[in-house]
């Protein structure tokens, strides 16, 4: 009886994941200036993990969100700040978030994870966001089979085998 709802939610999540991957691929190839705004100092402890709606989280991250997906189960926006480009996603349930992260993990990347939200981007961007949003950093697998266009520029310093 709830099969069509679950199937629809999964389809929405998969579509959003595909949009995320394409967005990240475009962002990585766009040539980040890497000016390192925000000083080289690292905060000794990140703040308490932020909570709230997509718009509230974006405001805390100092981003005006460009909404890409606006569904009941998943809301997703592209963000650009002085630190770089990233994708911010919020989820209706913890389970939906974990399923999304597990699927996205195969694509690699750095993930800043909070309660029912994820920010995805370059390791440097995720580290900067952690200073504003708290959360924990997760790193996806780094095996880009068949993907061309790897300029090595997006390795960010924590991957020894990028684009093989």
Image (spheres, rainbow, N blue to C red):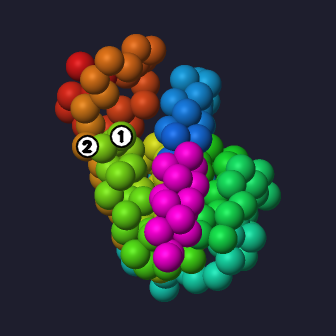
- Judged by its main secondary structure, the magenta piece is helix
Q: Specify the quadrant that holds the C terminus.
A: top left
Provide residue 25's location: percent of width, then percent of height.
52, 30
Left or right? Give the position of 101 relative to 66: left
**Local crowd size for mark 2, using a 10 Å CA cut-off: few (<14), some (14–19), many (≥20):** some
Magenta range: 1-16
Magenta highlight on residue 9: yes
Left or right? Give the position of 66 relative to 120: right
Instruction: Say which element carries label 1.
Output: helix
Left or right? Give the position of 95 relative to 88: left
Do callouts 1 and 2 mark residues in contact (Cβ within 8 Å)? yes
Q: In the drawing, what numbered circle is on residue 107?
A: 1
Q: Residue at x 74, y 70 (%)?
A: 55
Relative to residue 163, is residue 51 depicted above or below?
below
User: Image quadrant of residue 19?
Assistant: top right
Relative to residue 5, is residue 51 depicted above or below?
below
């Amino acid at each position: 009886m709830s099969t069509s709802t679950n199937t629809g939610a999964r389809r929405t999540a998969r579509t959003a994941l595909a949009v995320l991957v394409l967005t990240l691929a475009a962002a990585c190839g766009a040539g980040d200036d890497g000016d390192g705004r925000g000083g080289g100092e690292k905060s000794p402890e990140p703040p308490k993990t932020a909570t709230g709606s997509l718009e509230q989280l974006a405001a805390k991250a100092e981003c005006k969100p460009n909404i890409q997906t606006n569904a009941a189960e998943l809301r997703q926006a592209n963000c650009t700040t002085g630190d770089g480009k990233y994708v911010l996603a919020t989820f209706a349930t913890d389970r939906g978030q974990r399923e999304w992260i597990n699927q996205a993990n195969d694509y690699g990347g750095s993930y800043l994870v909070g309660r029912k939200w994820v920010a995805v981007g370059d390791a440097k961007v995720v580290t900067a966001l952690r200073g504003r949003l708290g959360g924990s950093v997760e790193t996806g697998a780094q095996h880009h089979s068949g993907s061309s266009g790897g300029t090595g520029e997006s390795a960010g310093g924590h991957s020894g085998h990028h684009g093989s």
